[in-house]
Amino acid sequence: MTAVLIGDRAGLDPETTRRLQEAGTYHVIAISGGNIAVLAGLLVAACRLAGAGRRAAALFAAAGLLAYAEVVGPEPSVARATFTAVTFLLARAADLRTRPLNTLALAGACLVAASPGQLADPGFQLTFGATLGILAGMPRLAGSAASTAVDRLGSLGRPAAKAALLLLGATVCAEVALLPVAATWFSRISLAGLLLNFAAIPLMTVTQLAGMAAAALAPAWPAAAAGVGFVAHLAAFGIVESTRLVDAAPGLVVDVARPYPALAAVYYGTWALWLCAPRRRVRACGLCAAALATAAVVSPPGFASPSRWLASSTCAGLDGPDAAGDARLRVLFLDVGQADATLVLLPGGRSLLVDAAGSATGGSGIGRRVVVPALRAAGVRRLDYLLVTHAHPDHIGGAAEVVREFAPREIWEGVPVPASPPRAELLALARATSATWRTRNAGERFVAGGAVVRVVHPPRPDWERPRVRNDDSVVLDVRLGDVSVVLPGDVGAAVEAELAAAWTPAPIRVLKAPHHGSRTSSSEGLLTALEPDVAIVSAGRDSRFGHPHPEVVARYEAQGARLLETGEVGAVSVCTDGRRAVVATAVDGMRFTLDP
C-alpha cells in the first residue's frame, strides 16, 4: 500500500518485485499516470459533490496534485505525470478545449525543453509511449468490430463487460506502442499483463483510495481507519497474488533481444501507416506489415536467445574427436550486456562458469533470463564450478539463479569481502545447497583432461576488505596445448603491470578485455606481455560507459589483435584442440580459425 500511495518500494521483497515485473503489472506500484489520474478524479469529484464549479474544482485538483507530488518526492515519473495532469486541469479551468493528443504533446515538449536528456530515459519513453498508444490507437479501434461489440454490451446493460473490453483495448494499444521500448530496456515481453491488468488496475485504484482514506481517518477515528485499511490490505494482497500467474504459466514471459534501431523504425512506421492511411486497402497493407515487424521484434536472433547457436558445434575443422568426445576446450563468452559471464567447458566434461552477469543497479534478472538458458543450451546439466571474480553486481548479480538451477559442486571467490550483501546471500545459498565454498589465490592450479587452469591473481590478502574492489578480481589463465585463454575480471592497469612477469608465451592467445574495455585497463604493458590474437569485450551495445574506450580499441589495433564486442556480434565461442582455435559469433555468423 505504501508503494502505491507514495512510491516507496523499500518494503517489497525481491521475489514480489520480480513477479510484478514479469507479470507486467509493476506499473501499479510505481507512482505514474494511473495513480495521478485516480487522485485527480477523486479531487475533482469531491469538489463537485461539495458544490464547487468546474473551474474551482480543476484549480483545487491541480493544487492538490502539486501538494501530493511534494509529499511523494522528486521522482521523475511523479513529476511527468503531475505536470501533464496539471497542464490539463489548468487548461480546463481556463476553458481551453483541445484534443488529448495536443495536451500530451504540449506537456512532452515542455518537459523535453526543460531537460532534453529525458528523451533517452526509459521512464519518459514508457510514460509517453503508453499514453500515445492509447490516445492514437483507441480512436482507430472505435471504428472496428470491437467498437460495435462494446456499444452492444452497453445497450444490453452490461457496463462491467463493456469496461473490460475498453480496458483490454487500452492495454493492447499501450503494449503495442511499448514493444520495442520494453525489448530495448528489459529484453523481455510480458503477455501476462494483458490478462492481469484486468485485476491489477482496479485493485490499484481500491488500494490507493482505501489507503488514503485510512491515512485520513487514523488520527480521529482509528477503528474506521483499521476497517478501511483492511480493505486496502485485501486489494494489495490481490495485486501481489495475481502475479503468481507467471509462475503457473512461464510461457507468458518471453525473452527477446534488443531490436536494432532500423527495425524499431520499421515497426513504428508500419503501425503509423495503419493508423493514418486514408484508404482501407492501404491500412490493411500497413497492418500486415506491422504484424511482420512485430514478429521480427519479438523473435530476433542474438542476445537473449542464442540456444540453437550454443547447442550447435563450433569446433568443425579441428582435428581429433568431435565435441561430443570431450577432448577439446570450449569457452563461451555470453552476451549479457554491460556485465560478465563466461562458460568454460573443460576437456573431460567438467564445467566452470566465470561470473554470472547482473546489472550495475542490481535486480536485472539477467541470470535467469540469459545465463541459465544459455548454460542449458550449451549442454550443462550440473555445474562443477562457479567462480565469482569479485562481488560487483554486474558479475555476481545472476549467481543466485545459477546456483538454484545448476547446484554447482564448488563456488570459488578470490578476496573475501564479508560486508558485501550479494556475497553474503550467495554464501548462504551455497550452504543451503551443500556447495563447497573455496577461496582461490595466485599460484593455484588444477588440470582437467589436459587443460590447465591457473590462478594468476589475487595474492592471499593480508587485511580484510571493507568493500569490493576491481583490482581484487580473480584472474585466470586457461590453457590447452598451444592455446591460452585469459580471463582477467575487472583488474586495472596497476595490477596488469604487477602481473607482467606471470605470463608464459602462447602461440595462440585469446583475451577477455579487462573491465569491459575500460580506458583504465588493457594497458600497453599487458598487451605487450600477452600478445593476444583475439580480444573479446563484454559490454552492452551503445554502452553508456563508452566501452570499449577508443584508446583501448586503438591499443588493440596497434597490437594486431582482432576485437570482438558482444554488444555487436552477440555471444562468442572459442573452441580449441590445443593446436588451433575456431572462433564463432552468434549474431552475424562470423567464423574464423586461429593458427600458430
Image: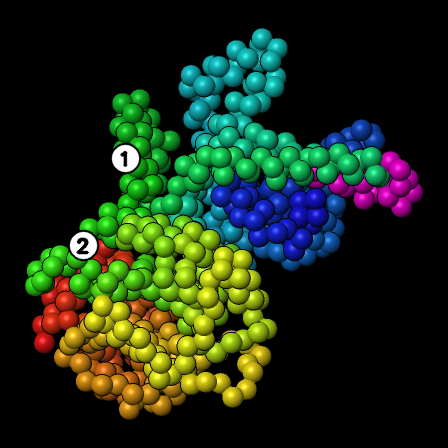
Q: Quadrant of the N terminus?
A: top right
Q: Main secondary structure of the magenta part?
A: helix
Q: Quadrant of the C terminus?
A: bottom left
Q: Residue at x 20, y 51 (%)?
A: 312
Q: Is residue 38 visible?
A: no
Numbered circles on residues, count: 2
Q: Nearer the viewer, residue 245 or 401?
A: 401
Mark 2: which secondary structure? helix
567 sits left or right of 506 in the view: right
Q: In this rendering, is residue 132 above or below 483?
A: above
Q: Residue at x 45, y 75 (%)?
A: 439
Q: Position of residue 134 (x, y in %)?
A: 49, 34
**Residue 408, quarter of picture:** bottom left
Q: From mark 1 to mark 2, how far is it between C-alphas? A: 38 Å
86 sits left or right of 552 in the view: right
Residue projecting furthest to the right: 220
Residue 251, magenta (yes or no): no
Question: In the image, which disc is placed on residue 259?
Answer: none
- Mark 1 or mark 2, earlier in chain: 1
Q: Position of residue 360 (x, y in %)?
A: 48, 64
Q: Which residue is mark 1?
A: 292
Q: Position of residue 150 (x, y in %)?
A: 52, 17
Q: Position of residue 77 (x, y in %)?
A: 58, 51
The residue under label 1 is which amino acid type?
A: Leu
Q: Nearer the viewer, residue 236 or 406?
A: 406
Question: In the image, which disc is placed on residue 324?
Answer: 2
Mark 1: which secondary structure? helix
The residue under label 2 is which amino acid type?
A: Ala
Q: Residue at x 37, y 74 (%)?
A: 489
